[in-house]
Amino acid sequence: MNELSKKEQLYQLIHANPFISQQDLAADLGLSRSAVAGHIASLIRERRLLGRAYVLPAPRDQRPVVCIGAANVDRKLRTIAALQAGTSNPATASEAYGGVARNIAENLARLQTPVALLTALGDDGAGRALQDHAQATGIDTRGSLALANTASGTYTAILDAEGELHVALADMALYDQLTPEFLASRAPQRAAAALTVADLNLPRDTVAALIDSARNDAAGAPLVLVAVSQPKMARLPHDLHGVRLLILNRAELETLAGRLLPTEADVRAACAEVQQRGARDVIVTCGSQGVFHTRAGQLVWLAAHQVKVVDVTGAGDAFSAAVCWSLVQEQDSADLTLACRRGLALAAVTVQSASTVAPLSDAGLLDNISDTDATHDPGNAAPLYTNA
């Protein structure tokens, strides 16, 4: 077998697994490490491979959204009757795949968007199930971190009889292994992204490294940060220059601001402070009421769809996914009002489903929401706030 065919075999192995080691390539092909290195250098010169991790170039419309953060097993306990504190409540139990970054990735995959997930998985049954489900859904997890002798992440939600969240408990310690060094080892895959979406389950240093990367690479993928809880707002550094969009709820914004935000004017001022710290735009979600978003120095309010709620779990992640989908589709001309309308539409589909990610998500639903539908009605005041 000639050298050209060996190089082509090596190319095919790398195409199937961009993170395969040179040692494994050498063993699979019966070559020396130096011969493997020579073939890789040749393929890089030909621009068929891109640097370390051998990530392959792709046309702009085929570049994936790279989601970085949590992928865990969600356990949901829902009371049969009204929830009573301090006593045992009859309930139903279910398990599903969850994690903010993973949920966003699955929503994007169901919207026919190329997507990759960088997360940490244990070597337990849950980790293997998460990996298999992601592959079946169309999420590329080849760059994720596999941890030996480690349990995968879990999230347990307590819901009332109407499906509203009362309390949640999360075991997310393994995501501390997603360090800046791990990010650096996945730099080529990140460089090939159309958009980077990261949740705040990541360590503070890793979040800072992502922001630094986005700030210092003007031609790189825009960065969207998605908050996950009030305690983890401490993982957000002060300097947010480089952040295209920060998505968080009102309670998380209050934590970030260090004060209560009882009026719309207070929310507007807090968002302006986040922008002064460097974030280009901010979206503040208000559950079943709707969302605020920044636009040209103003704060826009959009009401949520009024639908019958089956389960609120995953609605915020569906909203974030649709916003990200819209940013990728519209690219430089992205209208954040249109993106939020699309987010509210997908969130409405999700809360009407018992699944964390609605199985019938369809890009056609979002395509049908055009910029002509995205005008803001200034008379539609935010019902949670006064206008003082």
Image (cartoon, helix red, strand yellow):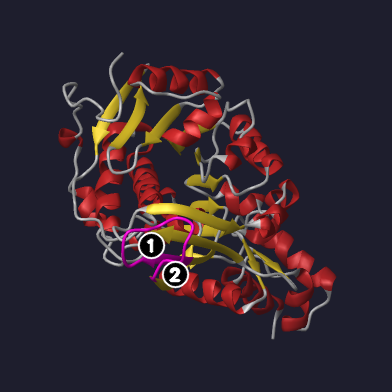
Locate residue 153: give its quadrant. Answer: bottom right
Image coords of residue 361 (percent x, y): 28, 61
Name the residue that disc number 2 marks: 96
- Which residue is situated farthest in the bottom direction here? 1
| Helix, strand or loop under label 2 | strand
Disc 2 and disc 1 in contact, CB within 8 angstroms? yes
Who's the residue at 38% across and 48% down the image? 316
Image coords of residue 278 (percent x, y): 55, 23
| Helix, strand or loop under label 1 | loop
Name the residue that disc number 1 marks: 356
| Mark found first going from the N terminus, 2 or 1 | 2
Relative to the observer, which residue lies in front, 98 or 385?
A: 385
105 lies above or below 60 = below
Image coords of residue 54 (percent x, y): 65, 60
> What residue span does the magenta drawing correspond to?
75-90
Please name the amino acid that badge 1 sits on.
Thr
Mark sitting on residue 374? none
| In magenta segment, residue 80 | yes
Please name the amino acid that badge 2 sits on.
Ala
Image coords of residue 123 (percent x, y): 67, 75
Dot 1 alpha-carbon crowd within 10 angstroms: few under 14, some 14 to 19, many 20 or more: many
Q: Is residue 56 visible?
A: no
Quarter occupied by the C terminus: top left
Q: Is residue 307 left or right of residue 289?
A: left
Quarter occupied by the N terminus: bottom right
| In magenta segment, residue 280 | no
